[in-house]
Amino acid sequence: MFDALHTIIGPNPDPWPFPKHKWTMKDILIAAVLYLTFLILTKGVAASTAFAMASKKYNISEDELRKAAKEQPWA
């Protein structure tokens, strides 16, 4: 069985395709910036989606909901 697979697909490919070198400071900084960008974008999308859904449900404009949320920061 394994001989047939070896013949068809060749030797076992490397299961971990990440770079083999150690991470430099530049690599770490790029990863951190990408991670923070992802967090900021997802938070913004989630907040605007929540305001849009609440405005539809309660028939209140999104601007009024945002003003109310600013007045009550604990909510």
Image: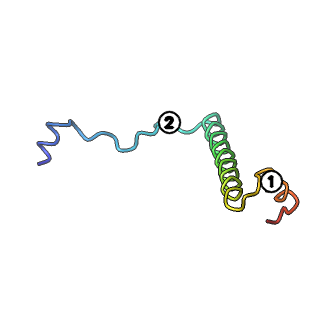
x 63%, y 40%: residue: 34
Q: Position of residue 45 (x, y in %)?
A: 66, 48
Rendered image quadrant of residue 3: top left
* Residue furthest out toward the front: 59
Amino acid at circle 2: His
Query: Toward which corner of the image does residue 10 lie, by quadrant?
Result: top left
Q: Which mark is residue 21?
A: 2
Within 10 angstroms of label 1, few (less than 14), some, or many (20 or more) residues? Answer: some
Q: Residue furthest right?
A: 71
**Where is mark 1, residue-wise?**
66
Please state the horizontal and vertical placement of residue 50, each as a whole percent of the image: 68, 56
- Which numbered mark, 2 or 1, is in the foreground of this view? 1
Classify mark 2: helix, strand or loop.
loop
Residue 7's tag is none
Mark 2 or 1 closer to N-term?
2
Nearer to the camera, 25 or 53: 53
Residue 16 percent location from the top left of the image: 40, 43
For image coordinates 60% across by 36% down, the residue present is: 27
